[in-house]
Image: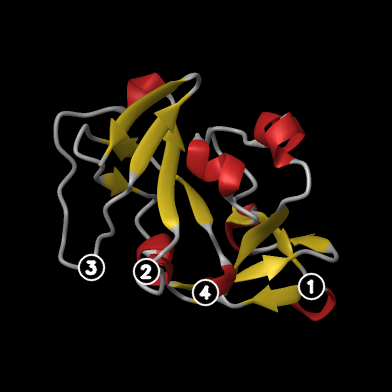
Amino acid sequence: SEAFRRAETVLIYDHVRGELSLDGLLRHPAAAGKRFLYPLCTAKGEMIAMLPGAWHSGAYGIREPVREESEEVDPAEIDLVICPCASFDAAGARMGMGGGYYDRFLKHFHRAKKYAVAYDFQIVKKVPMASFDMQMDAVFTVGTEFVRR
């Protein structure tokens, strides 16, 4: 997307348990020169963005940056956030794994684009949204953009 090509700092995730892998995105020519950050869960329902210096297996077996050996980055520096999801709908509603980590974190973003990525089969008719749930600017599946607001 144009937002990815223009972004200098991108928050992505390391996939687990059937989530869509972003490994190919990291090797794409448009990824050259970008700063890729990863989430670090710091407390129940809370996460921060880290520029990884070292990795370990964190909560739920998710590979995450080692806090003491990585750099925390202010959300204001992030141009694009790419989130995993369990399901999504055509309106850009995203359902995660139920912990609310991304929704709580994304409330700090005012200028960054918020994208979700998923498999085609994860689209549903309607995702229920609570007042704290964050709407995505776009949802992409492999090779297809489903939603653009």
Q: Which residue is mark 2?
A: 110
Q: Amino acid at mark 3?
A: Phe
Could you tell whether 124 is left or right of 56 in the image? left
Residue 101 is situated, as x and y percent measured from the top left of the image, at 43, 65
Residue 124 is situated, as x and y percent measured from the top left of the image, at 22, 29
Q: What secondary structure is found at the residue carrying circle 4? A: helix
Please state which of residues 124 and 92 is positioned toward the viewer in this rendering: 92
Mark 1 surroundings within 10 Å by alpha-carbon count, few (fewer than 14), some (14 through 19), many (20 or more)? some
Q: Earlier in the sequence, mark 3 or mark 2?
A: 2
Using the image, determine if residue 38 lies above or below residue 27.
Answer: below
Label pair 2/4, CB-CB below 8 angstroms:
no
Q: Which residue is mark 1?
A: 70
Mark 3–mark 2 distance (CA, rounded to whole Å):
15 Å
Q: Which mark is residue 76?
A: 4
Residue 89 is situated, as x and y percent measured from the top left of the image, at 23, 34
Residue occupying the point 42% across, 53% down: 113
